[in-house]
Image (cartoon, rainbow, N blue to C red):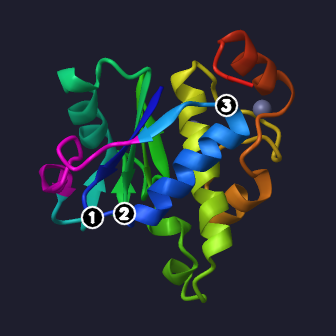
Amino acid sequence: MVLILPVGEVERETLEWLREDLEREFGFEAVVADENEAIPNPDFALDAERGQYDSTVMLYSMMERPEFKRYGRVLGVASADLFAPGLNFVFGEAGTRAAIISTRRLRETFYNREEDRGLLRKRILTEAAHELGHTFGLGHCAFQDCVMFFSNTIEDTDRKGPRFRGRCLEKMVEAGALGK
Ligand SMILES: [Zn+2]
Ligand SMILES: [Zn+2]
């Protein structure tokens, strides 16, 4: 069971998309956290100088919460821009049972282009699948059309799409990660 956890102000519809898409594409049973469980204010992870949020700090705060232990995986979704030490930004980050993604750079409006809801939905699923893949022990993959390819840019995300390919798909099956 995957708990989809809003971190800060997150557009509700995007969480519902993710729940549906994770079930449809991978057979993951997923639920969207209710308001008591959500992390309403991620300012503890804010780096004021950078104007960005530390994804590792967010991730650890999620992993520490005892009430999340009953979920197989916890997937945080933030709208704030994330960074990790040594990187200008990250689309997401994963730990052992928890992962976090940011929708910020998945929106066309971030690149001064017109909003594209269909593309946003696909990108959210792609980044979520990538980070969940890490939580099942997968590393980065050299194939540009596999979801485990490392995204440096949004073009990488669009090129690879949300599917596990080849050996990565086998590893997900071996890990018992894919429900259908
Ligand atoms: Zn990665
Ligand atoms: Zn792969």
Label 2 crowding class (10 Å Cα cut-off): few <14, some 14-19, many 20+?
some
Residue 9 position in % (x across, y down): 27, 64
Residue 148 visible within the image: no
Residue 150 visible within the image: yes
User: Could you tell whether 166 is left or right of 50 in the image?
Assistant: right
Sequence-wise first label, 2 or 3? 3
Write down the residue under mark 1.
9
The answer to the question of whether label 2 and label 1 lie on touching residues, with beta carbons closer than 8 A, is yes
Q: Secondary structure at mark 3?
A: loop
Residue located 79% across and 25% down the image:
169
Label 1 crowding class (10 Å Cα cut-off): few <14, some 14-19, many 20+?
some
Sequence-wise first label, 1 or 3? 1
Amino acid found under the numbered disc labelled 1: Glu
Q: Which residue occupies the extreme left position in the image?
A: 44
Q: Is mark 1 within 8 Å of ligand 1?
A: no
Residue 95 lies in quadrant: top left
Write down the residue under mark 3.
27
Label 3 crowding class (10 Å Cα cut-off): few <14, some 14-19, many 20+?
some
Q: Where on the image, by quarter, is ligand 1? A: top right
Question: As rendered, which of 82 and 40 lies closer to the eye?
Answer: 40
Write down the residue under mark 2.
79
Q: Quarter holding the C terminus? A: top right
Q: Name the disc covering residue 66, or none.
A: none
Sequence-wise first label, 2 or 1? 1
Residue located 24% across and 68% down the image:
51
Query: Magenta segment range?
Result: 32-46
Residue located 50% across and 67% down the image:
105
